[in-house]
Amino acid sequence: MNAPPTSTYGHHQGKGGGGYHIDNCELLYKILKGDTKLVRSLCEANGFTYTESHEWNLLWASSSCKAYLYEGLNEYQRINHFPHSYEITRKDRLCFNYVKLQEKFGRDAFDFVPDTYILPNEYGDLLSHYQKLKQTDPRRNVWIVKPSNSSRGRGIHIIDDINDLNVDELSIISRYVTNPLLINGYKFDLRIYVVVTCYEPLRIYVYKEGLARFASETYTAKFNKNNKYMHLTNYSVNKKNDNFVQNESAEHDDFGFKWSLSAFCKHLETVGINMSLLWSRIFDVIIKTLACGEHYVLQACKKNQMHRSNCFEVFGFDILLDSDLKPWLVEVNLSPSLSSDSPLDHTIKGHLLTDTFNMIQIKRFDRKKESLNKIKYRSKGNPNLPGGGATSAKHKSYKQDSTFCG
């Protein structure tokens, strides 16, 4: 990837506020909701000032953006969510869209999500599947139930008896992967950061660093559906366990119950795993998952007459590996956590944001000129020219070496 030039990463306290006069070409950022300490520190360390106006260069939101935020943007403004990204980050919508492509291209091409049903609408199909497995494969007739639009392990539980299921709640239920790959006897999943900078053409970058997150109780053949510390790998769940060991050094990135992705890969290489083959399978999962929501995003961008560079997205893909090294998609996070509870978190997530900001090329722009252009385009019945185009504006360069593969 040809990344913009970079310099050295650092933090300092910025001006904050936003009630003062805005300079015509000042770099401005705005934040909507959420834990964004890392975003704030990176912006202010690189000369941005906070604003509450709509004249920002960068808008960072911790949830899906309202439609009006995409209206009338100039080509230099950047938002960290595409419209309709929730089509793959809401668990029920991902299931719906995945099944549509599975029906179109076949189960052999789309076989990386365990059999899943949306409740309560698909309860009849679930019941038929459950009864069939009860007769043919009762030991593997285990299911995991998740709220349709929740995160951090909240509301997740495991059942092996359909009578334990509350069919009145809006949720999804998936077959539980009973043969996870284990490291030192513990189940884990991978948090892989994926940045999309454009959907037309589709441009995907997979960050070379990420996290391996471990359950904090050993996984045993004796199945205990009530032991969430054995089955769930969510950090927000396992950190409450007395057995949880926190990583305390970014340099010792294979210690405790959270490793770096690179440490995880080194471990698999030492035991003879073909990492090139494994990564090719993971890339396949990522690309096909993004395809599940692609047409919704394109339609929304065209409807709002947006420039193709207005949006970018930092997805958090959660991937589970089974004992056959098959990657399974657990979920896609719209706003993966940027909290830094450990030095390892701070290093990985700080570098991730830095490289992302370099790629999206945030540029200074003449606010007076853009306001006049907006008035001119609207007077012609065209509120915003799609597609962007050539520009002589100089983009901002951020700090840290690039660590993406695209």
Image (tube, rainbow, N blue to C red):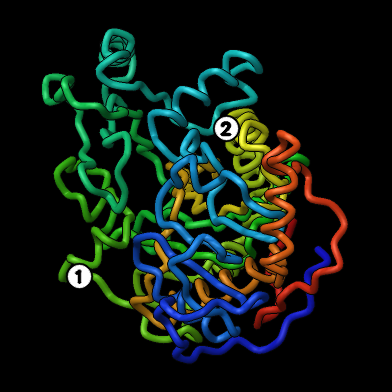
Judge whether 298 appears above or below 42 on screen.
Answer: above
Of residue 384 and residue 310, the one placed in the foreground of this image is 384
Per the image, the residue denoted by label 1 is: 243
Quadrant position of the N terminus in the picture: bottom right
Residue 66 lies, in percent from the top left, at: 44, 43
Of residue 27 and residue 35, the one placed in the foreground of this image is 27
Kindly indicate whether the residue at mark 1 contacts the one at mark 2 (C-beta within 8 angstroms).
Answer: no
Question: Badge 1: how crowded within 10 Å, few (<14), some, or many (20+)?
Answer: few
Between circles 2 and 1, the one closer to the viewer is 2
Residue 43, disc: none
Q: Would you say residue 230 is visible in this rendering? A: yes
Question: Hey, which quadrant is residue 302 in on the image?
Answer: top right
Per the image, the residue denoted by label 2 is: 293
Q: Amino acid at mark 2?
A: Gly
Residue at left offset 65%, top offset 43%: 281
Question: Badge 2: how crowded within 10 Å, few (<14), some, or many (20+)?
Answer: many
Provide the secondary structure element on which disc 1 rests: loop
Residue 237 lies, in percent from the top left, at: 24, 58
Judge whether 68 appears above or below 35 on screen.
Answer: above
Of residue 245 and residue 58, the one placed in the foreground of this image is 58
Q: Would you say residue 254 is visible in this rendering? A: no
Residue at left offset 59%, top offset 33%: 300
Say whether disc 2 or disc 1 marks the residue closer to the N-terminus. Answer: 1
Q: How many marks?
A: 2
Residue at left offset 38%, top offset 64%: 184
Q: Amino acid at mark 1?
A: Asn
